[in-house]
């Protein structure tokens, strides 16, 4: 069903953290969680949001969702229920990943996706009101780059941007209790939700973890390649335990391309999520 989260039973039946135990290791594939109000930008939006909602009543809005990653940029158009309307496309992230090069790739992807009414972007760094503050795996040139404004101009539709792990989280959380998302890819992403409300731009990846090194230094893709799967898994197991002690999360979701390399048995309240979840959450950025 990968491209059709709306066709899956929602995780609404979950009542306690223990609900994970029977599905240990399986990817979570569920409807994007809908009730949160993310603190994201509405860069360059000329139509007030309530007008947009009036429009919604008449026809289903098509949302172009873009996931910018260190290795790849993905795009897909979703309807308001999170159902995929176009085949998911992916291009490699240009190297160097300058703002101009990445914006050009997004434009090309957008063109191929056909019609859309609004754009959601998951970005691998701290983003506030469309303004990029950090992008550790893309480069220094992103600092203070107004991606929201540029994309609004280039794509000619309203744009909202959130951290990539935050967007991913919106696609999988249940909206109950303390939920944490860790993404394992080029970098280490993190997201925290309390009863469905996002604590934006958590950036746990850059906090100290082990032997004076950060979570990202020990668990990134580069660290996996350097240390090998066995050592990397040992570290990840330690991280999962440590994060439980710090945040006392009710549910932990492990996403990102490298979550497929998780070899150990996760605790009952943790599970892997589909890499495709990176795009589903894009719908939730418009729920306010
Ligand atoms: C960035 C995060 C991002 C993560 C995954 C980290 O280096 O600081 O913002 O979520 O990589 O892309």
Image (cartoon, rainbow, N blue to C red):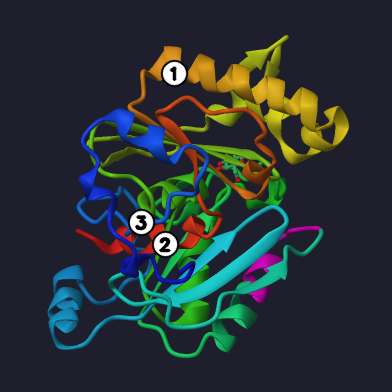
Quadrant of the rendering where the C terminus is positioned: bottom left
In the picture of the structure, the residue carrying the numbered disc 2 is 280
Residue bearing the label numbered 3: 30
Furthest residue toward top: 211
Earlier sequence position, callout 1 versus callout 3? 3
When the figure is inspected, residue 20 is found, relative to residue 151, above or below; the finding is above
Question: Which label's residue is closer to the chain start, 2 or 3?
Answer: 3
Q: Nearer the viewer, residue 244 or 20?
A: 20
Q: Can you name the residue that lies furthest to the front here? A: 22
Q: Main secondary structure of the magenta part?
A: helix
Quadrant assignment for the N terminus? bottom left
Left or right, residue 70 beside residue 280: right
**SS label for mark 2:** helix
**Callout 3: SS:** loop
Residue 254 in view, yes or no? yes
**Is ligand 1 within 8 Å of the beta carbon of the residue shown at mark 1?**
no
Percent position of residue 236, x then y: 64, 25
Relative placement, left or right, of 131 versus 95 is: left
**Toward the viewer: 11 or 210?**
11
Q: Residue at x 28, y 63 (%)?
A: 286
From the viewer's perspective, is residue 170 above or below residue 233?
below
Which quadrant of the view contains residue 95? bottom right
Residue ID at (75%, 40%): 221
What residue range appears in magenta?
A: 96-105
The answer for how far apart the CA atoms under marks 2 and 1 are is 26 Å
């Amino acid at each position: 069903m990968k491209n059709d989260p709306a066709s899956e039973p929602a995780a609404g039946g979950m009542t306690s953290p223990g609900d994970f135990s029977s599905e240990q290791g399986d990817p979570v594939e569920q409807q994007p969680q809908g009730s949160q109000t993310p603190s994201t930008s509405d860069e360059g939006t000329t139509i007030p949001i309530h007008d947009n909602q009036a429009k919604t009543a008449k026809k289903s809005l098509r949302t172009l969702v873009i996931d910018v990653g260190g290795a790849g940029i993905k795009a897909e158009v979703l309807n308001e229920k999170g159902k995929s309307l176009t085949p998911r496309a992916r291009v490699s992230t240009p190297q160097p990943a300058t703002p101009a090069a990445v914006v050009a790739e997004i434009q090309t992807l957008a063109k191929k996706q056909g019609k859309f009414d609004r754009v959601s972007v998951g970005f691998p760094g701290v983003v506030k009101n469309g303004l990029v503050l950090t992008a550790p795996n893309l480069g220094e040139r992103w600092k203070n780059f107004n991606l929201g404004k540029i994309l609004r101009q280039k794509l000619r539709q309203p744009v909202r941007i959130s951290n990539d792990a935050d967007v991913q989280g919106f696609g999988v959380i249940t909206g109950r209790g303390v939920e944490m998302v860790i993404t394992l890819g080029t970098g280490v992403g993190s997201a925290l939700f309390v009863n469905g409300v996002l604590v934006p731009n958590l950036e746990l990846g850059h906090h100290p973890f082990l032997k004076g090194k950060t979570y990202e230094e020990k668990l990134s893709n580069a660290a996996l390649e350097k240390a090998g799967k066995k050592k990397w898994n040992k570290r990840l197991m330690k991280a999962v335990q440590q994060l439980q002690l710090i945040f006392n999360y009710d549910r932990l979701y492990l996403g990102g391309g490298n979550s497929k390399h998780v070899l150990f048995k996760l605790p009952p309240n943790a599970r892997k999520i589909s890499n495709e979840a990176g795009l589903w959450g894009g719908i939730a950025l418009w729920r306010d």
